[in-house]
């Protein structure tokens, strides 16, 4: 919604993630993979391009294919993914409006913004989802296809 109003700017942060999985082996037969935890890069990546839709913005990125290396118990699989954190900021407060954080998504109305550290509003956290002031790829999935 913020993208439809003048004066709001989108602030995207995209981080490539990687996990290394180990084989689940029983009696010399691989049964599957033991999934490793996804770990994010330390810096943001830029999308190849983006597209505005009726429901928001789509970011297009290059995701490397999964890589499998080694044999037997030394075999590993490297998976790749993305963590996305987005917020909308209003650069200027309209006249007569008190100075409040002008950031969306805002926390739930029952939560006192004074109880949320300012660093939470300013810095995306890639270790958790559903954080105040930040939309993410898990909590804010688009369930409608734009075709």
Image (cartoon, rainbow, N blue to C red):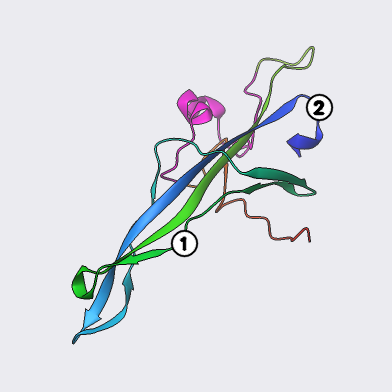
Quarter assignment of residue 96: top right
Residue 17 left/right relative to 7: left
137 sits to left or right of 94: left
Q: Is residue 97 left or right of residue 99?
A: right
Query: CA separation, marks 2 and 1?
Result: 39 Å
Circles 2, 1 touching at the beta carbon (< 8 Å):
no
Q: What is the span of residues highlighted in magenta in the rendered image?
A: 100-128
In what element is the residue under mark 1? Answer: loop
* 104 in the magenta segment: yes
Q: Quick one: which residue is furthest to the top in this view? A: 96
Residue 86 point in image, percent of width and height: 59, 38
Q: Which residue is mark 2?
A: 6
Q: Position of residue 88 (x, y in %)?
A: 66, 32
**Which of the two residues, 10 or 63, is positioned nearer the viewer here?**
63
The N terminus appears in which quarter of the rendering? top right
Q: Earlier in the sequence, mark 2 or mark 1?
A: 2
List the residue tagged with mark 1.
65
The secondary structure that dominates the magenta segment is: loop
Quarter of the image with the C terminus in it: bottom right
Q: Secondary structure at mark 2?
A: loop
Which of the 4 quarters of the picture holds residue 143?
A: bottom right
For the residue pair 44 and 48, the one nearer the viewer reads as 48
């Amino acid at each position: 919604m913020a993208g439809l109003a003048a004066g709001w700017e989108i602030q995207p942060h995209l981080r490539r993630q990687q996990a290394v999985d180990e084989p689940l082996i029983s009696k010399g037969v691989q049964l599957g993979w033991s999934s490793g935890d996804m770990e994010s890069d330390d810096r943001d990546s830029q999308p190849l391009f983006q597209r505005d839709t009726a429901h928001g913005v789509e970011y297009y990125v290059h995701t490397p294919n999964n890589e499998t290396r080694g044999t037997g118990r030394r075999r590993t699989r490297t998976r790749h993914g993305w963590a996305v954190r987005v917020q909308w900021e209003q650069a200027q407060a309209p006249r007569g409006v008190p100075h409040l954080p002008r950031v969306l998504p805002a926390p739930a109305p029952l939560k006192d913004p004074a109880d949320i550290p300012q660093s939470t509003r300013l810095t995306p956290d890639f270790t958790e989802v559903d954080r105040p002031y930040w939309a993410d790829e898990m909590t804010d999935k688009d369930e409608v296809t734009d075709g």
